[in-house]
Image: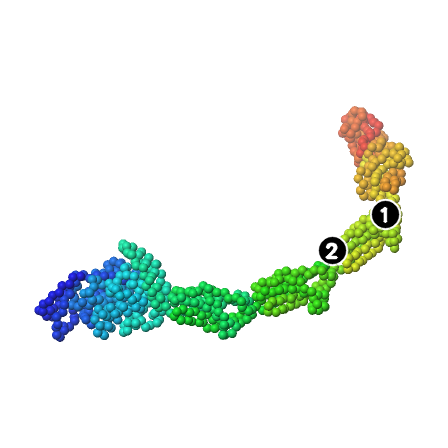
């Protein structure tokens, strides 16, 4: 900026009446013109900064008189780039004082983005004392205060210096060699950047405009920020700032504009402001969680307000408190809310405690109001009812207990039914002592009880608060005297030397001794103890079959069953007689009408005698008096001894011969025979032809029959004929279909004058028999 001073009295007088500047000047002339200094400036430039203002921001420069009132002369321009720089050229002024006004969008260095609306900033300056003018938040804030001080008689320089120092002191900045506000640049000066960031915070443009106006008004007359709400708001803004991020935002912004700048570190000014505005701590919240019967967990929330702060939890059984715990995580510092946790133990269960939270630093102490909590704990309680499961000498116990937050011992008391629990025995639950938290399952086994006995059982629960009892439950141990439901000798199973007993025993949970004995005397003086064993325990009836062996044949006996257990016994007697061992066979019958070619015998053993059959079968021969040892006997042995009725077939007999047969069976007592029968073995049937008559040229009638079937069913019979002798059924034949074994047959379709031969035939399962042969000759036509 170049200044040219013209001192010519004539020129001054002339200028007072005629303006040579292109800009209009409507200020009325002074009544008494005085000489004024003419200021000519080729160019004045600078930066509009909140963050850097953007292209298109409007700039106005107004000339001011010594009272800082506008003279009416102004100059206008716009920012042509995004770094906030402006220029005004060809300036001619009559006063050295000017006011700048800038209105536009700017880069928000805190948020890292372009503002959403426009912000209007001001600056006043003595352009003779500076080489350039920057418009920023400091120039904006000091404007009204400078104007006020000048009205109070201060020079411009004194007013500027005073106002700047007062504004810096708001932010705890007391540097003497700092440049004038309009010479500061946020890309170079940490002080300006720190103050600018604190003022911006996370505010919108509208909020920032309101804040700047409020500060300007507050400090206008006394240079002191008196509004504590504004102070708190500025402090909160500073607490939330992230200086490294802000610096990065600006570096990236300038880099995008093609400028490599070194943004200064301004954290010290943020910290200095926070330390300066620090006050006594502020408690923002507290939570007390009752954890157990003797402990709690305390969470405190507070703001240390940038002073080392100690946090104490005070408590006691009265509102006088009396005990305290210092938070181990302390002391704390800083301006943000912090949460501290501390556990307090050694408390009494089920007890009301009063408490408060206290915090203190060098600026003072604060305490919360007194509140109360109650520790957990109480008498233990039975949950639901006991479940009992009995054995013969045991009772299994299951249940649940609420320990009410205290370690609890649990016993199961038991006593015989209707007795007093004062004399009860007890067992300790398997899970005892129970841990304090939540319902707990318990179990125990009561042993060495009497079987078949009714008992009471209940819980006894004990903790440091006291003793409680559960509801008594009654149950009986298992077991009873043994009971014979059925004992009988099975008549169908009595043999000559053995018998079988059927036994049915009632259910019992006790092991039971079973004794089975027999004797020929009902007093059992000389009894034989045949079986001695243990049965059960069983939840169901027991069914048994026991075979008694080594008995005498044809002997009367008594059998006794005895059951014994620790509760008693039961017995029952049955009597029986062994069989004599004699085998009886039914009469052997020969059925000569049976259709098969072999001889068929049905054999029935009507009595086995109570002994196993060793061998059985059929004896047969051509002479009578058959025995298993006789030489005239043929033996046919039954290969499978099963059942009492069986069938035997004789297939190797000579046809039409006389035979004798009898059945036999052998056991250890001897050989036994059926009756002996006489029979004739089957053979071929007999065929007989009687005559041929009524012979014509092409037919004849024949008569014949079968007088004997041969002992086997005739399958077919009739006539066979042909022109050759010895005709058979391979030649022409007619089957006699009459019911009787004789009949006539009509032979037709014969040849005239031809000799024919005819025979009668009969067929059974053994073969065919032909009669004698007759011949006849048909007549000629």
Chosen colour scheme: rainbow
In the rendered image of this protein, does residue 100 appear above or below residue 641? below
Q: Is residue 779 left or right of residue 261?
A: right
Task: Choose top left, top right, bottom left or bottom right for residue 773.
Answer: top right
Task: Choose top left, top right, bottom left or bottom right for residue 681.
Answer: top right
Q: Secondary structure at mark 2?
A: loop
- Image location (x, y in percent) of residue 171: 31, 67
Task: Please tell me which residue lies in front, 501 or 424.
Answer: 424
Residue occupying the point 65% across, 62% down: 428
Which quadrant is home to the C terminus? top right
Crowd around label 1: few <14 · some 14–19 · many ≥20 (10 Å): some
Q: Is residue 415 left or right of residue 568?
A: left
In the rendered image of this protein, does residue 706 appear above or below residue 207? above
Which quadrant is home to the N terminus? bottom left
Task: Choose top left, top right, bottom left or bottom right for residue 224.
Answer: bottom left
Residue designated by label 2: 537
Residue occupying the point 82% across, 50% down: 530
In the rendered image of this protein, does residue 146 appear above or below residue 589? below
Determine whether label 2 and label 1 are within 8 Å by CB: no
Q: Sequence-wise, which precedes: disc 2 or disc 1? A: 2
Q: Is residue 676 left or right of residue 217?
A: right
- Image location (x, y in percent) of residue 339: 44, 64
Task: Please tell me which residue lies in front, 443 or 200.
Answer: 443
Residue occupying the point 24% across, 68% down: 161
Q: Is residue 611 visible?
A: yes
Kindly report the distance in space between the C-alpha atoms of the residues bearing marks 2 and 1: 32 Å
- Front disc: 2 or 1: 2
Residue designated by label 1: 551
């Amino acid at each position: 900026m170049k200044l040219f001073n013209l001192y010519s009295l004539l020129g001054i007088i002339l200028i007072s009446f005629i303006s040579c500047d292109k800009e209009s000047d409507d200020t009325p002339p002074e009544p008494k013109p005085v000489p004024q200094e003419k200021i000519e400036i080729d160019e004045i430039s600078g930066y509009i900064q909140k963050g850097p203002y953007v292209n298109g921001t409007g700039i106005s420069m107004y000339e001011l008189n010594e009272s800082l009132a506008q003279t009416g002369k102004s100059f206008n321009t716009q920012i042509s780039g995004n770094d906030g720089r402006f220029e005004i050229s060809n300036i001619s002024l009559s006063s050295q004082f000017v006011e700048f006004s800038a209105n536009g969008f700017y880069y928000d260095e805190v948020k890292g983005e372009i503002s959403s609306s426009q912000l209007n900033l001001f600056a006043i300056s003595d352009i003779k004392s500076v080489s350039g003018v920057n418009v920023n938040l400091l120039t904006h804030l000091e404007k009204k205060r400078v104007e006020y001080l000048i009205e109070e008689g201060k020079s411009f320089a004194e007013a500027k210096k005073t106002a700047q120092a007062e504004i810096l002191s708001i932010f705890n900045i007391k540097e003497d060699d700092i440049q004038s506000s309009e010479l500061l640049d946020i890309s170079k000066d940490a002080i300006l950047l720190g103050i600018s960031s604190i003022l911006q915070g996370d505010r919108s443009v509208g909020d920032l405009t309101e804040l700047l106006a409020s500060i300007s008004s507050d400090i206008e007359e006394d240079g002191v920020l008196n509004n504590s709400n504004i102070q708190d708001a500025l402090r909160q803004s500073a607490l939330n700032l992230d200086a490294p991020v802000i610096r990065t935002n600006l570096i990236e912004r300038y880099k995008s504009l093609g400028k490599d700048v070194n943004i200064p570190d301004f954290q010290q000014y943020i910290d200095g402001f926070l330390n300066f505005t620090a006050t006594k701590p502020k408690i923002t919240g507290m939570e007390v969680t009752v954890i157990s019967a003797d402990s709690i967990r305390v969470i405190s929330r507070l703001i240390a307000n940038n002073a080392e702060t100690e946090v104490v939890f005070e408590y006691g059984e009265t509102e006088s408190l009396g005990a305290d715990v210092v938070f181990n995580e302390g002391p704390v510092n800083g301006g943000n809310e912090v949460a501290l946790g501390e556990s307090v133990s050694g408390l009494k269960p089920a007890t009301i405690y009063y408490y408060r939270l206290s915090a203190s630093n060098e600026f003072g102490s604060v305490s919360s109001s007194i509140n109360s909590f109650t520790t957990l704990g109480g008498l233990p309680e039975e949950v639901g009812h006991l479940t009992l499961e009995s054995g013969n000498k045991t009772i299994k116990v299951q249940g649940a207990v609420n320990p009410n937050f205290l370690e609890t011992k649990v016993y199961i008391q038991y006593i015989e039914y209707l007795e007093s629990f004062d004399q009860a025995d007890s067992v300790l639950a398997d899970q005892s002592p129970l841990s304090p938290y939540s319902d707990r399952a318990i179990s125990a086994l009561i042993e060495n009880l009497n079987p078949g006995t009714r008992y009471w059982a209940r819980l006894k629960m004990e903790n440091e608060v006291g003793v409680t009892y559960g509801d008594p439950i009654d149950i009986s141990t298992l077991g009873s005297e043994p009971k014979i439901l059925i004992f009988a000798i099975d008549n169908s199973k009595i043999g000559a030397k053995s018998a079988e007993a059927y036994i049915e025993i009632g259910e019992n949970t006790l092991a039971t001794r079973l004794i089975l004995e027999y004797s020929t005397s009902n007093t059992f003086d000389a009894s034989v103890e045949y079986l001695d064993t243990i049965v059960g325990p069983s939840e169901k009836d027991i069914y048994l079959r026991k075979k008694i062996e080594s008995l005498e044949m044809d002997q009367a006996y008594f059998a006794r069953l005895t059951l014994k257990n620790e509760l008693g016994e039961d017995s029952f007697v049955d009597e029986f007689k062994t069989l004599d061992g004699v085998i009886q066979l039914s009469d052997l019958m020969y059925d000569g009408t049976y259709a098969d070619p072999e001889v068929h015998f049905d054999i029935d053993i009507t009595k086995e005698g109570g002994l196993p059959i060793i061998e059985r079968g059929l004896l047969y021969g051509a002479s009578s008096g058959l025995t298993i040892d006789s030489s005239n006997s043929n033996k046919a042995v039954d290969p499978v001894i099963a059942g009492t009725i069986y069938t035997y077939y004789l297939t190797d007999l000579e046809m039409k011969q006389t035979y004798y047969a009898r059945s036999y069976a052998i056991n250890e007592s001897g050989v036994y025979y059926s009756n002996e029968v006489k029979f004739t073995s089957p053979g071929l049937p007999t065929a007989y032809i009687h005559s041929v008559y009524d012979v014509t040229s092409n037919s004849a009638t024949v008569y014949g029959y079968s007088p004997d079937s041969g002992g086997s069913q005739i399958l077919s019979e009739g006539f066979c004929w042909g022109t050759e002798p010895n005709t058979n059924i391979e030649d022409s034949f007619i089957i006699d279909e009459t019911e009787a074994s004789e009949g006539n047959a009509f032979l037709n379709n014969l040849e005239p004058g031809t000799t024919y031969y005819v025979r009668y035939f009969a067929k059974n399962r053994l073969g065919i028999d032909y009669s004698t042969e007759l011949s006849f000759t048909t007549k000629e036509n």
